[in-house]
Image (cartoon, grey):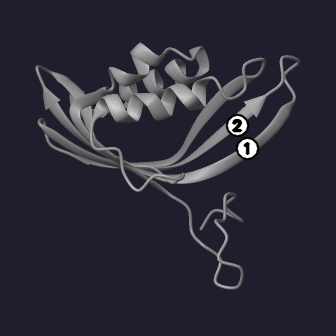
């Protein structure tokens, strides 16, 4: 495994851990200050980290008594020492204090990362879900692996 691939793995693990801990500062540290985020929910884009931080803070407080988990699957990346593109299927779940899964959804995620000072930071994030032809509703669970 190359150093950049190991760095990508560390970004994924830091993302998962910061969500589980609801550590907003650790989560935001993954993003370059100029990051642009195309989220799948309600807002067309977040053009700066402070704007994205407000949205993430809202997510983190949305289930105060519950626990969040994030699982990355089918991770694919293309990288150079200074730049990487990562895509994955990500499952976001909410669990009760007793560990029961209350709900979950899957998103398609793409990151563009730029390495600065040997640390890759997300400069662009794009999350999406396919939309059903018949009902125009987002499909938040993958039927099966292709």
Is residue 2 something that shows in the picture?
A: no
The answer to whether the residues at label 1 and label 2 have Cβ atoms under 8 Å apart is yes
Q: Is residue 26 left or right of residue 120?
A: right
Measured as percent of width and height from the top left, residue 100 is found at 87, 28
- List the single residue furthest toward the bottom: 134
Q: Is residue 143 left or right of residue 17?
A: right
Q: Earlier in the sequence, mark 1 or mark 2?
A: 2
- If the image is split into quadrants, where does the C terminus sit? bottom right
Give residue 22's quadrant in the image.
top right
Q: Is residue 30 or residue 7 the one in the foreground?
A: 30
SS for callout 1: strand
Name the residue at 79% across, 28% down.
Answer: 95
Name the residue at 71% across, 65% down.
Answer: 143
SS for callout 2: strand
Name the residue at 56% across, 62% down.
Answer: 129
Q: Is residue 138 or residue 57 the one in the foreground?
A: 57
Name the residue at 88% across, 18% down.
Answer: 98
Against 89, is 27 above or below?
above
Pointer 2 residue: 93
Q: Is residue 23 or residue 76 the one in the foreground?
A: 23
Against 141, is 93 above or below?
above
Measured as percent of width and height from the top left, residue 34 is found at 20, 35
Separation of marks 1 and 2 at Cα, in angstroms: 4 Å
Q: Using the image, tell me which numbered label, if any, was put on residue 29.
A: none
Measured as percent of width and height from the top left, residue 93 is found at 70, 37
Q: Is residue 111 left or right of residue 89?
A: left
- If the image is split into quadrants, where does the N terminus sit? top left
Pointer 1 residue: 104
Against 22, is 132 above or below?
below
Is residue 38 something that shows in the picture?
A: yes
Measured as percent of width and height from the top left, residue 78 is found at 26, 50
């Amino acid at each position: 495994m190359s150093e950049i691939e190991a760095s990508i793995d560390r970004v994924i693990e830091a993302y998962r851990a910061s969500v589980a801990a609801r550590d907003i500062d650790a989560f935001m540290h993954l993003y370059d200050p100029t990051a642009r985020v195309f989220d799948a929910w309600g807002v067309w884009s977040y053009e700066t980290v402070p704007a994205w931080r407000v949205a993430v803070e809202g997510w983190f407080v949305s289930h105060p008594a519950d626990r969040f988990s994030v699982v990355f699957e089918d991770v694919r990346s293309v990288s150079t020492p200074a730049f990487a593109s990562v895509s994955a299927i990500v499952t976001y779940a909410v669990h009760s204090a007793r560990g029961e899964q209350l709900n979950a959804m899957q998103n398609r995620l793409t990151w563009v990362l730029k390495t600065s000072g040997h640390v890759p930071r997300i400069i662009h994030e794009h999350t999406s879900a396919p939309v059903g032809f018949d009902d125009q509703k987002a499909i938040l669970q993958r039927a099966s692996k292709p």
